[in-house]
Amino acid sequence: MDKIKNLLYVALIVKLLSCNNPIQDEPAQASVYCLDSIFKERIELVRPSFQNVEQTIHLTGTVEAMSDRVVSFVSLVSGVVTQTNFTLGDQVKKGQVLAELRSPELSTLTSEFKKLQSQIGVAETKLQSVQSMYNQGISSRKDLMEAQSEVDILRSELARTSEYLELYSASLTDGVFQIRAPATGIVTQKNITAGSQISPESGALFTISDLSKVWVLGNVYATNVSEIHEGMDVNITTLSYRDDQFKGKINAIPSVMDEEEKVLKARIKLNNAELKLKPGMHVDIHAFKPLQQVALAVPTRAIVFDDNQHFVIVYKNDCELALQKVDILVDNNRVTYLKAGIDTTDAVVSKNQLLIFEQLKNFQN
């Protein structure tokens, strides 16, 4: 009997505790995805518009320095390089001392320079004496003219020797020729080191290229020759700068195939103020060919590809976003042209749309 009373007592306590501490219901999960204020600042919206359709033709190519912006330095004298002040890839300014050269020709020119200075001093003293005697009627006009001629000849020879010394950037105090940069640019070739023996026959000692503007040479294969022409707009991308697009136009297309690669080398002139494009760099070229057609267009970056279908995110307000399937007519790396799916009244998310896409899919599942 006591056992039954104890069980009833325990049951009563449990019931009282359960009444005082009811189990809280879990909050209901939201049924609609809404943009929060912070994430909304990270998106961009665009409205579709009707545009002339452009087909993209993909080419490969390389960057090259423009030939009229390349300067190669060849020594006019023979000697031994005693010092170099630059390395391959350095940016240099016109007139900057890049190397020093010790040469027997400098000794010859220096001796001749000093000799001429001494001879001019003697000749000028003689001229003053003859001038004085001429003024006194002792010397003839012929003597005066010969003395003046001698001074003029020596001065002319001194000026010529000075020009040579200046041309070779001679440093008489150090006894060396200074090799100075003939132009401002990037050192793209270097063929000398300290201790090198050089002569006028040694060829280019170094090459300086002004890379503020460069050529991009696009490979036009036989299958694309009829589609590529001068004046076409192009976008150029590189593996080194994936997020950058370099815009330009095809400036020239030669009439002769490259003998080694069997392609036409379309030339594209690009501004390169930031020096991002380097000679020898491989690039992808997207040439845009206009078609005789108009279609609704959105930026290609706004398109989401999933499960073999194309979608855009249509925005009406922060809590009304929809996945909208679209049919593609033509696309390129700039613009995608649509057959159907949206119209010009729709606002489309064109930045960070993938994050919204995943959230909307989760809410649909």
Image: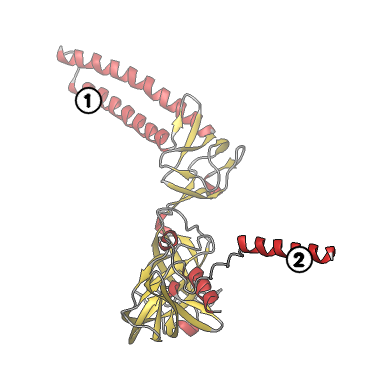
Image quadrant where residue 119 sits: top left
Q: Is residue 251 above or below residue 111?
A: below
- The percent coordinates of residue 306 (x first, y second) are 54, 79
How many residues crowd around disc 2 within 10 Å: few (fewer than 14), some, or many (20 or more)? few
Q: Is residue 264 above or below residue 122?
A: below
Dot 1 falls on a residue whose secondary structure is: helix
Q: Which mark is residue 8?
A: 2
Q: Quadrant of the N terminus?
A: bottom right
- The percent coordinates of residue 356 (x first, y second) are 48, 70
Residue found at the far front of this picture: 1
Q: Which of the two residues, 118 or 203, is positioned nearer the viewer here?
A: 203
Q: Which of the two residues, 54 or 253, is positioned nearer the viewer here?
A: 54
Dot 2 falls on a residue whose secondary structure is: helix
Q: Which residue is mark 1?
A: 145
Q: Quadrant of the C terminus?
A: bottom right
- Mark 2 and mark 1: span between their CA atoms? 149 Å
- Does residue 48 appear anywhere in the picture? yes
Q: Residue at x 49, y 85 (%)?
A: 223
Disc count in the image? 2
Q: Is residue 165 above or below residue 25?
A: above
